[in-house]
Image (cartoon, grey):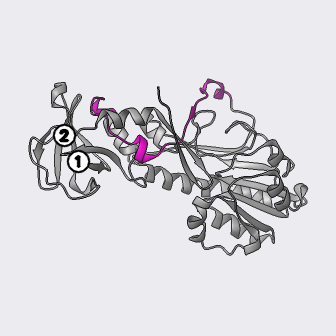
Amino acid sequence: MKRQFKHVYLFGYSPMFVDIYKICKKYDIDIYLICGKRQIDLIQKLSIQIEKENLYILDSLRKEKLGHIIKSPQSSIGISFGSPFIFTQYDIDQFSGNLINSHGAPLPEFKGGGGFSWRILQGDKRGASLMHLVSTKVDEGKIVFRNDFKFSKNEILPIDYERKQLSKDRENILPWLDSILNGNSKIKEITPEKGNEVYRESYFPRLQTDIHGFIDWKIDIDSIQSFIQAFSRPYSGASTFIKGEKIRILNCTISAKTFVHPFLYGLITNIEEESFQICSKGGFLRVKFNDLMYENKIIKLYLGDRLYTPESYLEKAISSRVIFKPDGPRLIEYEE
């Protein structure tokens, strides 16, 4: 089969850009990289040699820019990993339809952003190495590659999910891309497997830990645990307060399940050398001191101290939305 593509345009950022770069070099394919300002530091840490004239740091994909960048639509392929740009039909046409996007979720569920945090909150262990054609609607293009897998019960934090996802994508997506770029395969729609019609379509927005990651001590103990884990590493941790100071919690375990009166929620009732115990709705949580991060200064904890989150922080978390632009996040606050 004759090789179809002579130019590869990478959008966004991914550690897999290193692997794709090597594939392109192997087949003498020109490679270009288009990213936003907020991604350039990550790009520069990759061990790839992108020619200066082939690196584009853009604040948007305005027609005149992308039209100038793409050399030959018929022989070009666009590959998006975490792209900060909104693609229009004009952008898609610049690649003659050969613009694909990686989405590490079991589409048509979990469209949009928020990464793995939403799935940790939901207790959803389904993973997918998936590529789909880009359309003008978010994550609704036809799927052209898919390999499903499961996250293990020991993979509980976003960083665990990220590592597994990257490993699976390298194992599954890279051979497929290699076959596409060397001309042995073509990009074509996958016929959905029988039974996939039972999947519910869903969309989730992006999250920002400093806005959305505040613990509501009124929710049940299982939900608190999954909430803390959802905002853990590589993020900065779920936030709450003690003695007027903000602190962050990176992980916790459930030490016992039992009735706990609402007036006890957040109370520290046991302190040991390496951890302390917190009263929660439906039982007791245990937090290791190593999983506690102090915002301004180290706080000495005593029996009878209470963790709490002011309602103003909880209200802001549910009345705000974050939109990530090429140059960084934009906070949208909805008021009465």
Q: Does label 1 or label 2 sit earlier along the sequence?
A: 2
The image shows residue 115 at horizontal and vertical percentages of: 52, 45
* Residue 184 appears in the picture as rendered: no
In the depicted structure, whether residue 283 falls above or below residue 293 = above
Question: What amino acid is labelled 1 in the image?
Answer: Val
Residue 34 lies, with reference to residue 100, above or below; the image says: below
Q: Residue at x 85, y 47 (%)?
A: 93
Q: Quadrant of residue 304?
A: top left
Q: How far apart are labels 1 and 2 at the CA level? A: 8 Å
Q: Are marks 1 and 2 in contact (CB under 8 Å)?
A: yes
Please state which of residues 147 and 130 is positioned toward the viewer in this rendering. 130
Disc sitting over residue 217 in the figure? none
Of the pair 177 and 65, the residue shown nearer to us: 65
- Main SS of residues in magenta: loop
Which residue matches tag 2? 278
How many numbered marks does the figure carry? 2
Q: Residue 213: within the magenta? A: yes
Which residue matches tag 1? 287
Q: Quadrant of residue 175?
A: bottom right
Horizontal side of 170 relative to 7 (left or right) equals left
Residue at horizontal 32%, vertical 50%?
A: 250
Q: Residue at point 18% right, 54% down?
A: 299
- The magenta-colored residue range is 194-223
Q: Residue 100: x percent and y percent? A: 74, 49
